[in-house]
Amino acid sequence: MKIDQLHQLFLQCEKVNTDTRKIEQNSMFFALKGSNFNGNVFANQALKNGAKYAIIDEEEYQTSNATILVEDVLLTLQQLATYHRDYLKIPILSLTGSNGKTTTKELINTVLSKKFKTVSTFGNLNNHIGVPLTLLSMNKETEIGIVEMGANHIKEIEFLCHIAKPDYGYITNFGKAHLEGFGSIEGVIKGKTELYDYLIKNDKHIFFNADDDIQVNKLSPYINKTGFSQLKSDYYTIKLIDAKPFVKIKIEDLIITSNLIGKYNFTNLCAAVLIGKYFNIDPKEIKEGIESYLPKNNRSQIINKGNNKIILDAYNANPTSMEAALTNFANLNDKNKMVILGDMFELGNESEKEHQIISQLVKNLGLETAYLVGENFHKTKSNSNFVKTFKSFEDFKSDFKSPSHTTILIKGSRGMALERILECI
């Protein structure tokens, strides 16, 4: 079946689905394959559960006119998403970066939704499957689409750009994330700037941090761009007022107090402000949008349990974000402070070195109590009485005693699931 014909069937459906456990009535099911599953097997069940059509790529599972056979289900999903994106003809804003992508995306969506009907990436569905699903969740009522793009190898962002065809783009930063796939920080920069390469090649608009020398140098010859800065008057000026603990910024004559902690969130806020201004949203509405945004999903959440205050940042971690979080935490005025850190994943050959650097940083910051959890942190040497390491979460849990009147930073990679610690406090 041709993509234009499939698109006509798609328009008859309410949404797209790839999981039979979450099928909704009148949806279109895509029978994706993985290393441990074959979606074709569940196509008939998807139809029984309420799907209007099931897209398959193995002929033996074609049981009715509602099962549509294609050569490759994943490729078809991606092609349909691009066709739908062209069909809608709406502006698409894409963003990527090593840290802060999802928070920045949420902030941008909160600001732009003050004036426009927006659709943005749900959670962090930002890969070769998530980007198509995001595009297919947009409809004729959508006025701006916001698409987050993630990658851990060279050429992935380039591939996602050809699916989403962004009109606008922003890169949060370049940090020591996914070094196992990118190979080095130079590889990270090369991989992430594939977004800018696409936008420049197609003469699209770029938003950027004018205080980031890497971005400034990359974009120096390019004209179709808008930047923010704390210091340079030829860009839109945004000032950091405070970050103890919540980030407070100043734009024009307005003070905006966010619900985000840490100086590392300053540029995330700046991006949302800059993009809001570009789309002619009143500064007072930008302020309302940002101040209404509450972080969730284990990202910089502040949780009060008993007489303890917990900063839960357990969604993800890499050396750059870990250093920023620790430095900010050390600068808080709270009296009793404790850190509980989990291993950082996908660092490849740099893992041992980077975990040792963080362990040393914890010691140098002089925090009262520190727990380092995971096989990588367990190998580190801190030579400090207040730093304790544990090979597993279970080992940590059996030793941990809940504190009182303490501010606790919890941070680690997603695979460590450190939000489990909340049950121990």
Image (cartoon, rainbow, N blue to C red):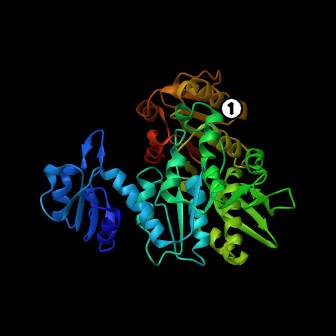
The picture places residue 312, in percent across and down from the top left corner, at 54, 50
Above or below, 272 relative to 414: below
Above or below, 400 relative to 263: above
Residue farthest toward the right in the current orientation of the protein: 233
Label 1: few (<14), some or many (≥20) within 10 Å? Answer: some
Task: Name the amino acid type tagged 1.
Answer: Leu
Residue shown at 59% from the left, 42% from the top: 191
Q: Which residue is mark 1?
A: 361
The picture places residue 259, in percent across and down from the top left corner, at 63, 62
Identify which residue, 95 or 406, lies in the foreground: 95
Identify which residue, 161 or 141, lies in the foreground: 161
Q: Is residue 418 left or right of residue 17?
A: right
Residue shown at 82% from the left, 73% from the top: 253
Residue farthest toward the front in the current orientation of the protein: 2
Can residue 38 be seen at all in this image of the molecule?
yes
Residue shown at 26% from the left, 71% from the top: 26
The picture places residue 151, in percent across and down from the top left corner, at 52, 44
Identify which residue, 149 or 380, lies in the foreground: 149
Secondary structure of the residue carrying numbered label 1:
helix
Quarter of the picture containing the N terminus is bottom left
Task: Tell me the quarter of the picture where residue 350 sits.
Answer: top right
The total of numbered circles placed on residues is 1
Can residue 407 be seen at all in this image of the molecule?
no
Q: Is residue 346 left or right of residue 215?
A: left
